[in-house]
Amino acid sequence: MHYVDGFVLPVPRANLDAYRALAQKAGEVWLEYGALQYFECVGDDVQPGKLTSFPQAVQLKDDEVPVFSWIVYTSRAERDRINALVMKDPRIDCKPEDMPFDGMRMFWGGFTGLVEMGWGAGPKG
């Protein structure tokens, strides 16, 4: 089973091009160090829920769109190794004031695969 880092964050619509450029550069770095896949997806069918939802989780404002992202690794150990290298890489500039989104409303976590099917799922278990 693979290991996946997942992220959800609010991006102002006016900043989507800047975010795309940042994500493109970041994805290239993660893949260079060994990540298997890198995805950045813009929400286009995400409605507020009664108890929770993507918009509620990031306190989405009217001029923002939620972005759902994930990075796939072969294992947790590989993820930890790759992330350590990425965080030291000078191409990854993580100054909060330079980000095209509000990092205080971003959430993330690491996940061990439970069921994997389809493209890139790996060996059948």
Image: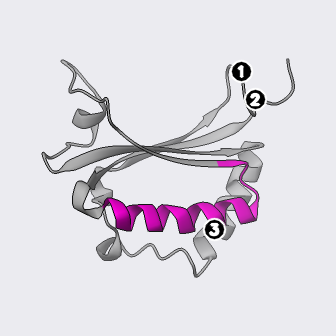
Q: Magenta includes 20? A: yes
Considering the image in quadrants, where does the C terminus appear?
top right
Q: Residue at x 46, y 67 (%)?
A: 22
What's the amino acid at mark 1?
Answer: Met
Give the number of marks: 3
The stretch in magenta equals 16-37
Mark 3 — residue? Answer: 86
Task: Point out the tag, 1 or 3, that comes first from the N-terminus.
Answer: 3
Give the foreground label among 3 and 2. Answer: 2
Task: Point out the tag, 3 or 2, that comes first from the N-terminus.
Answer: 3
* Residue 76 position (above or below residue 27): above
Mark drawn on residue 59? none
Q: Distance between the Cα atoms at labels 1 and 3?
A: 28 Å
Judge the density around disc 3: few (<14), some (14-19), many (≥20) Cα neighbours within 10 Å: some
Mark 2 — residue? Answer: 121
Mark 1 — residue? Answer: 117
Q: Residue at x 69, y 51 (%)?
A: 79
Front residue of 49/120: it is 120
For the residue labelled by badge 3, is the local secondary structure a helix, a strand or a loop? helix
Residue at the left extreme? Answer: 62
* The quadrant where residue 54 appears: top left
Q: Position of residue 24 (x, y in %)?
A: 53, 63
Callout 1–callout 2 Cβ contact below 8 Å: yes
For the residue labelled by badge 1, is the local secondary structure a helix, a strand or a loop? loop
Q: Position of residue 100 (x, y in %)?
A: 31, 66
Q: In this rendering, would 73 be left or right of 106?
A: right
Q: Residue at x 73, y 59 (%)?
A: 81
